[in-house]
């Protein structure tokens, strides 16, 4: 009987000790949560920004400016051709904000219900230019000159996915030279690849945006395409409907329309659309 009593006594003591320990741990966990809240710690939010390759220099400068004044926000930027980025959004890639170099790509996402019409707008404009290596002889002074026999290779972005390539194709078609230079065309995945081809001398000329041309000291602008020969060059900005951070995406969307961002865009050669 004494042995049974001692066993029950030990069991009760063990249960009491466990209960006290659990209460202590619970108190410590609660105190830790309170301390974290009191210290002002914030959950870090990553905003995924999918942007045209021609915006890379400007957005790389804007990224730390925004993060330094918006605690807990990290901008994760992906650059590429607007058409490729559009396809990625359609396929469900993580995206909060889309910054296109062409209206058709944004319009396609609006039509498919992936971007709300009221949450997108044309933010910037650009110019299409024909570039050549900096030390190239001055034999090219107009878009029509690409049909000259001494010019063997001309680079443009893939017209199906690269807006600059589409604009270049439109310009050459309207000037009547497109059909005559098919054996010269070298297609690139985006305007930055076109720029690299010209810088390295792999091609003798290429079509890029003025902003891309201004970023390099290894090329020069040989000619500017007549805006009347291609569709207007606009850069639509929009919030992707599938964003899990609507408030934060809206804040960044609005900030890009503000004066601080405008100054950086202007520094890289972008302009604002003319008011109707």
Image: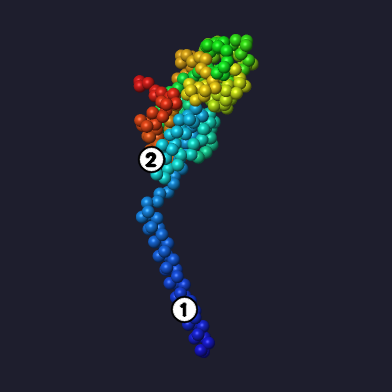
Q: Give me the residue at 52% from left, 38% from top.
A: 93
Q: Give me the residue at 53% from left, 31% from top.
A: 80
* Coordinates of residue 204 in the picture (x, y in percent): 60, 17
Q: Give me the residue at 54% from left, 20% from top.
A: 219
* Coordinates of residue 175 in the picture (x, y in percent): 53, 11
- Count the labels in the image: 2
Say what secondary structure mark 2 lies in: helix
Whole-number angstrom distance, CA of label 1 to CA of label 2: 56 Å
The residue beneath circle 1 is 13
* Coordinates of residue 47 in the picture (x, y in percent): 45, 40
The reply to whether residue 104 is visible in this rendering is no
* Coordinates of residue 199 in the picture (x, y in percent): 57, 23
The reply to whether residue 79 is visible in this rendering is yes
Please tell me whether residue 213 is drawn above or below residue 74 in the rendered image.
above
Image quarter of residue 268: top left
Q: Residues within 10 Å of mark 2 (few under 14, many from 20)?
A: few
Please tell me whether residue 251 is drawn above or below residue 22 in the rendered image.
above
Residue 249 relative to residue 87: left or right: left
Please tell me whether residue 125 is drawn above or below residue 114 in the rendered image.
above
User: Quadrant where the C terminus lies?
Assistant: top left
Q: State which mark lies toward you, 1 or 2.
A: 2
The residue beneath circle 2 is 69
Image quarter of residue 65: top left
Q: Give me the residue at 59% from left, 11% from top.
A: 147
Say what secondary structure mark 1 lies in: helix
Q: Earlier in the sequence, mark 1 or mark 2?
A: 1
């Amino acid at each position: 009987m004494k042995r049974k009593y001692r066993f029950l006594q030990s069991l009760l003591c063990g249960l009491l000790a466990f209960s006290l320990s659990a209460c202590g741990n619970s108190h410590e966990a609660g105190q830790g949560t309170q301390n974290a809240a009191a210290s002002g710690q914030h959950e870090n939010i990553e905003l995924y920004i999918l942007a045209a390759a021609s915006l890379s220099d400007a957005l790389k400068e804007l990224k730390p400016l925004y993060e330094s004044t918006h605690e807990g926000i990290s901008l994760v930027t992906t650059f590429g051709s607007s058409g490729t980025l559009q396809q990625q959004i359609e396929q469900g890639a993580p995206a909060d904000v889309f910054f296109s170099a062409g209206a058709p790509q944004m319009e396609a996402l609006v039509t498919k219900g992936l971007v709300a019409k009221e949450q997108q707008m044309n933010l910037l404009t650009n110019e299409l230019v024909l570039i050549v290596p900096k030390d190239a002889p001055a034999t090219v002074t107009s878009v029509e000159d690409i049909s000259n026999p001494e010019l063997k290779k001309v680079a443009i972005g893939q017209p199906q996915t690269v807006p600059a390539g589409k604009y270049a194709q439109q310009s050459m078609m309207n000037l009547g030279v497109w059909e005559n230079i098919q054996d010269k065309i070298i297609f690139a995945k985006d305007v930055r690849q076109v720029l690299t081809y010209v810088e390295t001398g792999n091609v003798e000329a290429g079509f890029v945006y003025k902003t891309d041309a201004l970023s390099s000291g290894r090329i020069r602008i040989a000619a500017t395409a007549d805006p009347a020969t291609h569709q207007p060059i606009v850069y639509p900005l929009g919030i992707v409907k599938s964003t899990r951070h609507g408030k934060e995406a809206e804040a960044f969307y609005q900030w890009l329309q503000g004066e601080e961002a405008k100054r950086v865009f202007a520094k890289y050669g972008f302009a604002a659309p003319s008011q109707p």
